[in-house]
Image (cartoon, rainbow, N blue to C red):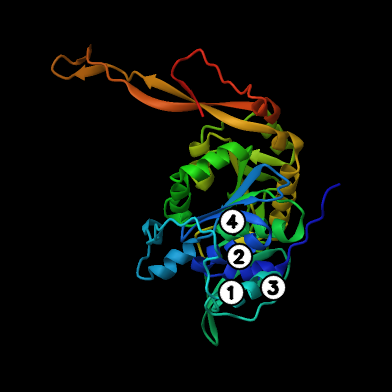
Amino acid sequence: MEQKVTINPHMIWNIFRLRTEKILPIYYYILHKFDYDIYYSEDNYIVAFPKNGTSNILICCHIDTVRDRKIIYPNYVNYSSVYPYYTTNLVNNKEFPMEDIDDIDYIYKNLDKEIIQIDKYFETDIYLLIDRNTENIIKCVRKINDNRFKGEILGGDDRAGLYIITHILYYTNARPIIALFNGEESGCIGSRKCAENREIVELLKKKVTFLIQFDRRELIDFRDEDINIKITPKGNYVNYLGNVLSPYITQKMESLNYTLSSGSISDVKILSEATGIQHINMSCGFVNEHSSEEKLILSALERTINAALELLNDPVLNNNKFIMIKKKKSIIPNYYEYDYPLNRYKRNNVISHVEYETYEEKMISLDEINNSNFIISNDDEDDIPF
């Protein structure tokens, strides 16, 4: 039976205004309360494995926003090229790292309620506005003084993803593997640090069957003066490694009314390259990201939560590992060069080879893996199974 999703505006309000540097410690505590084993790297990432998991799928998002970089570097106009500093102190803590336990516990217990403001943890000059006509669109303003506000970056990229993961934790019985990354907007810093930890990578290879990120804009049908924007009725998703996806994945996404799109990079690509597990990044409600015109479409956010729950409960996705086989190829560039004195092309006998990597998809059952029959045989000796 399809589960009815109701968006909690208080939870959106709280999550979107959390100070980025406080999110990983807060969610360390939250995930601990939800009975997860946690790998924690200060300022970089959390990777959490449920002690009583219901899904072998990993879901992830990034916690930073472009708004952070604007705040850190207010003198830059083109802040998309600014790279803020993130500490690289790697700590796999076994004990809770926070000092302010009472404040964190209060936030954990009231994240879906109206929280008394704690300046240390919330941006108190940020306000979210909901469109009165549709009650479906949220935008953001920053308070300048008592009588003046200005448009601000909402941060739906990717606080919408963080909301989806939090909603799943608080309101459903699904307990997937979870990863949160910092520094995606500055070059996927957190996920790259995570990929350097061989212990975590080996655990992911062993436990995860499929990777899902929530960090994708909605596609817009048209704009007009009254509604301002109208998104397509379908969601969209991307794969960053040449659309290397098993047919079951593409068919499943089509059945959920999601269409394959294109994109450049996000954290899930880094995880996929490190583990050899197939991935998708799903749209999750925001449009016009990285600008003061950014908006969050609540109906699209609800759609993504419903689709995510359908994927997390899918027996095929949970009982089969969706992997990629890396294949090394060689390109022989055009080895004719133009001879200007003779006004013709001539052959250059020095032929250079350029190596590049491609991937092939494969779906293999966990039973076959557990029975020690997991063998990938390839005719090409350059093929590299993960």
Would you name the residue on which mark 2 appears? 29
- The CA span between labels 3 and 4 is 28 Å
Give the secondary structure at mark 3.
Answer: helix
Marks 3 and 4: which is nearer the front?
3
Give the secondary structure at mark 2.
Answer: helix
Would you name the residue on which mark 4 appears? 287
Would you name the residue on which mark 1 appears? 101
Disc 1 to disc 2: CB gap under 8 Å: yes
Any part of residue 264 in sight:
no
Q: What kind of residue is marked 4?
A: Val
What label does residue 110 carry, if any?
A: 3
Earlier sequence position, callout 3 versus callout 4: 3
Marks 3 and 2: which is nearer the front?
2
Total marks placed: 4
Any part of residue 336 in sight:
yes
Marks 1 and 3: which is nearer the front?
1
- The CA span between labels 1 and 2 is 9 Å
- The CA span between labels 3 and 2 is 13 Å
